[in-house]
């Protein structure tokens, strides 16, 4: 019996899809320009799953594409150089050797740039990364900033220390603040004054405020009952025991005393979360989901409850509820379904995505999630999760992660979604540009 070969997951990519790249400053935007069909076409385990997702999309009205190009860059993690190289390689900006750092290209003026969350932490500089993002914002770019789990953790850690003590929040800085210590050092160096230090109590009192008090675990377990799932309560207590020594070592690395660290936390609150703060625009402009055509952009993923909420109130309604919850900075919010959008990896402990939720998305014309959060070492990945297409677009951009994970140099990468129905994955760590065109697949 003759068996017809399966069609490739993408047809041969048409020429001329990628925008021109300008490199005035002499920076090498080492992103590939030659296209190939998305490589999961060669994986026999993935092709049937992805094919089933595409067939389901066709049954629910087919694809609707953005009216203008979308450029998705995620998980920059405090690496401004990697971020700017990504924008150069995607054809969005032209960098200059002198004067302003960059300006938008013609393609950059047409495009919508979606920042997929996790601008903060890791390094080399949180404030330099936000300064670059602010330059992009001020350039006139159509910019959409999404929340990531690291961005939310900054908010929770700072508010836990600056607000009134509570057994439900006493551990949050120790639990979540370790990763923001480099950012706090930067805030201390740039914004904290001698008067800020003079306003604080002595070293012993400040250190006691940084840590949960004796007997915290028992009080937390009792107070959290009914607000958090039992397994979450158990996990929180266990994690605190493991993090105490690690926290002290990380604080010592910053060179800050307890008083200086407290001053940095209060400075961080002024800088990021009070009206008129120099970086207040970052959180003020932060959403949790964005939709363009048949694509849903989110940091981590989605669950049935958020599928239902999207159906009920749409993306703007979901964003409004997320912003309201994030301002209150409760642990119940962090472990709830709204924050699941920035935390999930579809683990058993996460809120579940089932066929019911996937069907609801398709009925609303959403056929693919574009996300960050799961970093990859060979560029973007396209796969089916819980029966729904997901494009993982965290390309391990920041130098701190790259060094830890055996990748060299400064990372760069971007995902382009074009009105023509073409999806292109660019990464410094993959030799060609990956091309996916779902409507042209046989």
Image: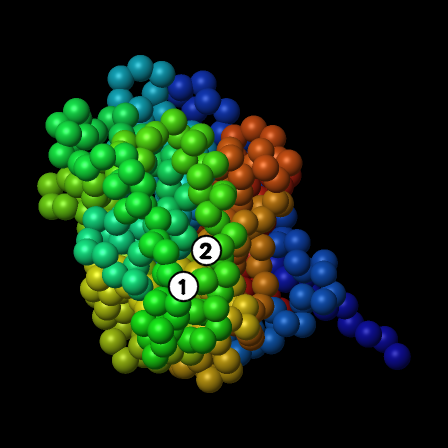
Measuring 74% from the left and 65% from the top, which residue is drawn there? 44
Task: Mark 1 and mark 2 in contact? Answer it, CB < 8 Å.
Answer: yes
Of the image marks 1 and 2, the number of the one nearer the N terminus = 1
| Horizontal and vertical percent position of residue 288 | 32, 60
Residue 233: mark = none
Q: Nearer the viewer, mark 1 or mark 2?
A: 1
The residue closer to the viewer here, 235 or 281, is 235
In the displayed structure image, the side of residue 420 where residue 226 appears, left or right? left
| Residue 321: x %, y % from top left | 23, 68
Q: Which residue is mark 2?
A: 240
Query: What residue does disc 1 label?
Result: 217
Residue at 36% from the left image edge and 76% from the top image edge: 225
At horizontal 27% and vertical 69% (from top left) the residue drawn is 318
Specify the farthest residue to the right: 1
Left or right: residue 11 compared with residue 416: right
In the rendered view of the protein, which quadrant contains the N terminus? Answer: bottom right
Q: Residue at x 15, y 29 (%)?
A: 198
| SS for dot 2 | helix
Q: What's the CA distance linking mark 1 and mark 2?
A: 9 Å
Per the image, label 1 sits on a secondary structure element best described as helix
Residue in front for this viewpoint, 286 or 139: 286
Question: Splitting the image into 4 quarters, where does residue 296 fall?
Answer: bottom left
Q: Quadrant of the C terminus?
A: bottom right
């Amino acid at each position: 019996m003759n068996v017809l070969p399966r069609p490739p997951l993408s047809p041969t990519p048409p020429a001329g899809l990628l925008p021109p790249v300008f490199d005035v400053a002499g920076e090498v935007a080492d992103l590939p320009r030659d296209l190939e069909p998305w490589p999961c076409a060669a994986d026999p385990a993935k092709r049937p799953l992805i094919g089933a997702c595409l067939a389901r999309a066709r049954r629910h009205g087919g694809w609707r594409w953005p009216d203008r190009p979308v450029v998705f860059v995620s998980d920059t993690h405090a690496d401004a150089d990697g971020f700017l190289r990504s924008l150069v390689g995607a054809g969005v900006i032209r960098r200059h050797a002198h004067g302003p750092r960059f300006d938008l290209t013609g393609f950059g003026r047409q495009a919508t740039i979606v920042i997929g969350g996790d601008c903060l932490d890791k390094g080399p500089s949180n404030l330099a990364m936000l300064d670059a993002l602010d330059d992009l914002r001020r350039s006139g770019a159509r910019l959409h900033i999404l929340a990531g789990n690291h961005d939310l953790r900054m908010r929770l850690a700072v508010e836990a220390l600056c607000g009134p003590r509570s057994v439900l929040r006493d551990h949050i800085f120790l639990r979540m603040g370790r990763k923001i210590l480099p950012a706090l050092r930067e805030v201390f160096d740039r914004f904290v004054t001698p008067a800020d230090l003079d306003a604080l109590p002595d070293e012993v009192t400040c250190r006691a405020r940084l840590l949960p008090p004796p007997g915290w675990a028992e009080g937390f377990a009792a107070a959290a009952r009914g607000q958090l799932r039992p397994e979450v309560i158990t996990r929180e207590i266990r994690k605190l025991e493991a993090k105490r020594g690690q926290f002290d070592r990380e604080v010592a690395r910053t060179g800050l005393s307890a008083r200086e660290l407290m001053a940095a936390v209060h400075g961080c609150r002024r800088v990021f979360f009070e009206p008129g703060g120099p970086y207040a625009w970052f959180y003020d402009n932060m959403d949790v989901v964005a939709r363009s055509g048949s694509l849903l952009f989110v940091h981590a993923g989605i669950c049935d409850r958020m599928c239902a909420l999207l159906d009920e109130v749409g993306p703007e309604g979901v964003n409004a509820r997320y912003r309201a919850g994030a301002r209150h900075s409760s642990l119940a919010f962090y472990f709830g379904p709204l924050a699941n959008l920035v935390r999930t990896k579809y683990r058993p402990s996460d809120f579940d995505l089932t066929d019911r939720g996937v069907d609801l998305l398709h009925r609303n014309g959403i056929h693919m999630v574009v996300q960050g959060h799961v970093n990859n070492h060979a560029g973007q990945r396209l796969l089916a999760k819980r029966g729904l297409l997901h494009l993982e677009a965290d390309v391990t951009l920041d130098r701190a992660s790259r060094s830890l994970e055996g990748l060299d140099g400064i990372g760069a990468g971007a995902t382009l979604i074009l009105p023509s129905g073409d999806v292109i994955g660019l990464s410094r760590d993959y030799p060609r540009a990956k091309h996916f065109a779902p409507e042209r697949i046989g």
